[in-house]
Amino acid sequence: MSTPVARSATRWLACLAWLLAAVLLAGCGVNRPLARQAAARVALERPQQLDCTRSDHCAIASAYAELARRARSDSRAEAPVHYADALEQGNEALLLRVHLIRAARHSIDVQTFIWAEDDAGWLVLDELIQAARRGVKVRILADQLFALDDVDWLARIARAHANLEFRLYNPTFDEAVTQPVEFAASLLCCFSRFNQRMHNKLFLVDGEIGIAGGRNYENRYFDWDQQFDYRDRELLVIGPHAGAQMQASFERFWAHPRAVPLTRLNDVNARIMREPLAAQDLAMPAGVDAARIEALRRRALDATALAALARRMLRIGVVDYFSDAPGKTERADDPALRALTARIGGLLAQAQREIVLETPYLVLSRPARKVFRALHQRSTPVDVIVSTNSLAATDAFYVYALSYKYKKRYLRGYGFRIHEFKPFPADAAQFVADYDALSGGANRGRYQRYAQAPLKRSGVRLGLHAKSLVIDERTTIIGSHNFDPRSDDYNTESGFIIDDAALAARVRAAILLDAAPQNAWVIAPRQRGGVLARINESIGDVSTALPLFDLWPFRYASSFELKPGCAPSPPDDPQFYACHEDVGDFPEVDLPLKTIYTRIVTAFGAGLVGIL
């Protein structure tokens, strides 16, 4: 029972919060006179002269441009031709971006969720500015919340060149950088809009060479971070049909009212008006590894090496690029605004034999749970193999805690075979050998993943960030969609859907490699031990069903490590427990506080699924 003092304190805190929101709201809104002045100054001061007078704007020769010409020439309206390849290695994905920027002849459009002020972020921005200066039209659209929180950078970008435009999606309080107080106020005053983010990732050159998937612009997505790198995946697609779809999607976001030019943001405008003209260049920030950047730039000009990479491209037919609409949350019941989300659900429901799924966050939306339950209840259940993060590998322990809460549901209710990625997987040589074995030797030596990351306990930790599906060894989905409630209901997402057996085989092999015993733990039921075990399981079921207070510490499932000399086997195999050692709920997690926090979120976080 609350005391008068407690009730008074609660009312006082509530009033203070709303007062804070009211003060901030009173000061929000575009400063229109300042915006007009800044726009006029930018138009006057930003350079318009070009570094190149050739019609191709001095684009370098590229085997990828030749593939684009070939796809364009061979395509028919009823039979489009595309070339495609999955980008598994981060350093290679960055190399290709720099190469394609330099090979661009007319236009470059970039859409992203995160853009950091580190080596990779600066390198790509600088290359884009150089492309603009030689005559290529460059447009960048980044979600405001996690992109370039340095107002100095943004002021310089706004005036870099007349051929470069930069917009931020869904800015808070008409500013580029959200301060902590503004962040708190946005949760109070306008949470629904603040919670909707643009999670799309797209890199499109000349309207026909595109990259989409999970990578943002930050060192950790390109194997360049010294503490934590992502295992991610993108698809590089070349061809007119998918190119037109990518272009149309970008145009729709670019024209949306939530895509705001820098000259309409109050903090950027204020900096523009007081910054001298001489400071327009985007100088390399302190701490950047200049030697590493220059080495990659030299490789981007190596025609022989890039031609070898281009020869990996598969010639395929139809490729579809899907994207949710920028107004996705404005009309929640309109399926036309959720193109990618709706398409994924339909394809899953049509699966006949097998689904191979990779996601960093195994938290399913209600529609997804319904689909997987139906697939498991068939007379011949669909085999579902899941590769996801362990607590030791994840970048979001609070999301992992929600997955941890529902492991029994995943294992028994949906029949999932779950493999949780280790923070220090096997060395690069073993990855290559296993990939070759899984591919039947057809792609020998194709991937040399993690070559940039030392794999010792004191080295760089790795975590999954790839979002991929392979259905019946035929249909492949690669994009930004995490297959979770946030991707379904709040964020806008994008990605490719391809019906091609050869590409599916490549991606399936890569996911199964991440799930291999040397790289992941198997999640399986604990060995049952009589009446006490059954009582424990019953109590656990009741605790899990509660929306709050899921505090029962003894869970249904655990993590298992393959014993030396044993062959891998699924949990329903009679030899599983003889060949696998139970290594506990959170293997390789040494911090007691992290396990405590995980259990707290498990107990109290069920209602936060959509937000997290």
Image (cartoon, rainbow, N blue to C red):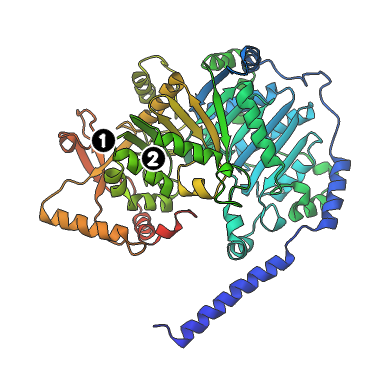
Callout 1: SS: loop
Q: Which residue is found at the position 43% from the left and 17% from the top?
A: 445
Q: Amino acid at mark 1?
A: Ser
The disc placed on residue 308 is: none
Give the Cα separation between the discs numbered 2 and 1.
27 Å
- The quadrant of the picture occupied by the N terminus is bottom left
Q: Residues within 10 Å of mark 2 (few under 14, many from 20)?
A: many
Percent x, y for residue 181? 62, 64
| Residue identified by numbered label 1 | 379
Query: Would you place residue 367 above or below residue 295 in this image?
Result: below
| Residue identified by numbered label 2 | 388
Query: Would you place residue 340 above or below residue 429 in this image?
Result: below
* 283 or 312: nearer the viewer: 312
Q: Is residue 291 left or right of residue 158?
A: left
Callout 2: SS: strand
Q: Amino acid at mark 2?
A: Thr
Q: Which residue is found at the position 64% from the left and 17% from the top?
A: 68
Query: Would you place residue 497 above or below residue 281 in this image?
Result: above
Q: Earlier in the sequence, mark 2 or mark 1?
A: 1
Q: Which residue is found at the position 42% from the left and 45% from the top?
A: 361
* 545 or 235: nearer the viewer: 545
Q: Is residue 140 left or right of residue 577?
A: right
Q: Is residue 288 visible?
A: no
Q: Is residue 335 left or right of residue 461?
A: right
